[in-house]
Image (cartoon, rainbow, N blue to C red):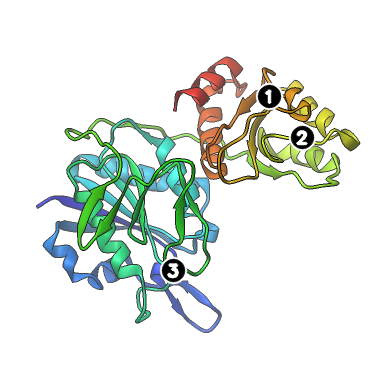
Amino acid sequence: MKRVLVIATGGTIASAEEGSGLAPALTGEQLVAFVPEVAQVCHVEVSQVMNVDSTNMRPEGWLTIAGEVRRSYDDFDGFVVLHGTDTLAYTAAGLSYLVQGRSKPIVLTGSQLPMGDPGTDGKRNLLDAVLVACDDAAAGVMVAFGGKVISGTAARKVRTRSFEAFDSLNVPDLGRVRDGRMTWAVDVEAGAVSTARFYDELNPRVAVLKLTPGMDALVVDALRPACDALVVEAFGLGGIPEYDGITETLLAWVDAGKTLVMTTQCPYEGADLSVYEVGRAFCDRPGVLMGGSATTEALLAKTMWALAQAAGPDGVVDREKLAELFASC
């Protein structure tokens, strides 16, 4: 039987009502005990790295999870990360950049209802995630939730209550789990999946700026002391307002050595700032990176990863190296 490490972090799946609202209470061992069918699929061990509401998950937590995978990598065939749903897509993206290459499967899942709830989706999701982690063709970071299997850089939580909480944006689902069987919807490369490249640095000084009608340029200036980069959610294909100095302030941001990553507020089909005049000032500008059709969650994590790798000993970011890293994955 294959060996799977379940890495427990808390979230709704581990939560119970203790008088002041749902909060993580159950351990990873207790969660696995709710799903005895897992023992028929593989040998499971549990590592409890934290027990938090995913609202409190930060990039430091991504590094903790990636570090646990790295320490245990040679001892297991796959990994299942139990995680709260609200920031699961961010963590999946973060792990996708911290563990690269054709790595052993790292499957994130959670639930919309606590494991102790009679109607919970946690039992199915946990079993599905284990099945994916044990599949011979599985590799890399994935999300298994509500029967879907989604690339770690394409997932987004789109429903707050429904069991099918996650969608894959701009790329097809990798597959589905039905009746205890994994069916791949895309061509996957079978074979050895032991090659992995691990990274242990992120630059968390990145924020997402969603443009809104009438926004004051002072909002951008206020972020300058705390941020080295902004992921800018522009309008439509990539429209940036020209009024009240928004465009000028954003361009001054990159002229000061900081980074902009341009994307769109629209979840599907991506951005192209070259189409309209209101976006062209940002095209081919040093310090401006284009997000294409990637999710905001993936762009945030990717920027944190790339900034850390492109920084020299003095902390200064090599823009050419940053652009190369950003385009490489």
Mark linked to residue 240: 2
Decide: is 122 above or below 87: below
Q: Earlier in the sequence, mark 3 or mark 1?
A: 3
Q: Amino acid at mark 3?
A: Gln
Q: Which residue is mark 1?
A: 274
Q: Quadrant of residue 246?
A: top right
Outermost residue toward the left? 1
Q: Residue at x 21, y 63 (%)?
A: 179
User: Crowding near pointer 1: few (<14 within 10 Å), some, many (20+)?
Assistant: some
Question: Could you tell me the amino acid type at mark 1?
Answer: Ser
Q: Position of residue 270 (x, y in %)?
A: 58, 37
At label 3, counting other C-alpha atoms closer than 10 Å, the crowd grade (few under 14, some 14-19, many 20 or more) is many
Query: Whole-Å distance between the Cαs marked 2 and 1?
Result: 12 Å
Residue 61 in view (yes/no): no
Which residue is nearer to you in this view: 149 or 10?
149
* Residue under pointer 3: 112
